[in-house]
Image (cartoon, helix red, strand yellow):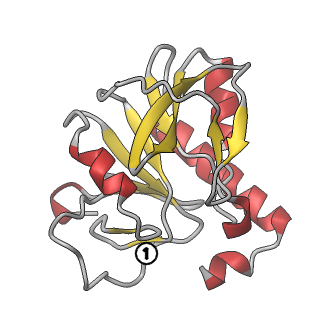
Amino acid sequence: MQKRKALSTDEAFLLSEKVFENFIEYFKPVSDQKVHVFIPIEKFKEIDTQIFINYFLSRNIRIFVPKIVDTKLISVEIFKDAHFEINKWDISEPVSNVDSKVLDFNYVITPLLYCDKKGNRVGYGKGFYDSFFENLSSETKKIGVNYFNPDEFIDDVWENDIPLDYLVTPTDVLSFFNGEE
C-alpha cells in the first residue's frame, strides 16, 4: 500500500496503461467474451480499470462489474449508459441491483494489495472475492493486476483462499498454474 501511495497520479496512470497493454497483448479478448472487472478505489490508487472498460465497450466485449448487496458480491452487466453511485466504502458501483448470475466469465480482473509468486492474493480482508471465486466456472481465468511484481511469499494463506491464475503488471504476465510461474 505504501509503494502504491508513493506513486504520483501520472505515474499510476502510465503504469495502469502498461498493465492494460500487457493484458490485451497476452489474453487478446474478443467480441462477445465476458469480462468481470473491478471499479478502482481512487483513494487507494488502484489500477485504473476505466481503460479496460472503455476498450471492452468499443469492442463489444461484455462487461460485468462487482456490487456488494447485503454481504455478497454480485456481478452486474454494464453498458455505455450505465449509472453509478458511491457505496459506503467509497467504491463506485452500478445503481442497478440486478445480478447477472453469470458464472462462466472468460476473465475476472481482480483488485489486490499484493500477490505472491504462487498467486496468493492479499485483498482488503472482506473475503468478497474468495466467495465470488468459489462459484465461478473452472474455465474462468482469475487475473490480478498490480503495479509491482511479487517478491515475497504470503505465509498466512487461509485454507479457503483461492489463488489467482495470473498476475498482470507493467512488465510481466505471470501464470500460477500448479504453483509454477
Report x, y in % for residue 163.
Answer: 27, 60
Report x, y in % for residue 83.
Answer: 72, 28
Q: Nearer the viewer, residue 158 or 34?
A: 158
Residue 157 figure quarter: bottom left
Q: Secondary structure at mark 1?
A: loop
Residue farthest toward the front in the current orientation of the protein? 70
Circle 1 residue: 150
Residue 108 figure quarter: top left
Q: Amino acid at mark 1?
A: Pro
Q: Seen in the image, is 104 located left or right of residue 158? A: right
> Is any part of residue 28 visible from this angle?
no
Q: Residue at x 56, y 61 (%)?
A: 171
> Is any part of residue 35 visible from this angle?
yes
Q: In the picture shown, does residue 133 fall above or below 98?
A: below
Quarter in which the N terminus is drawn: bottom right
Q: Nearer the viewer, residue 58 or 67?
A: 67
Q: Residue at x 44, y 55 (%)?
A: 144
Q: In the picture shown, does residue 97 fall above or below 14?
A: above
Q: Residue at x 60, y 66 (%)?
A: 147
Q: Nearer the viewer, residue 144 or 19?
A: 144
Q: In the picture shown, does residue 93 fall above or below 6?
A: above
Report the label total. Answer: 1
Quarter in which the C terminus is drawn: bottom left
Report x, y in % for residue 21.
Answer: 62, 44
Q: Residue at x 30, y 68 (%)?
A: 120
Residue 55 figure quarter: top right
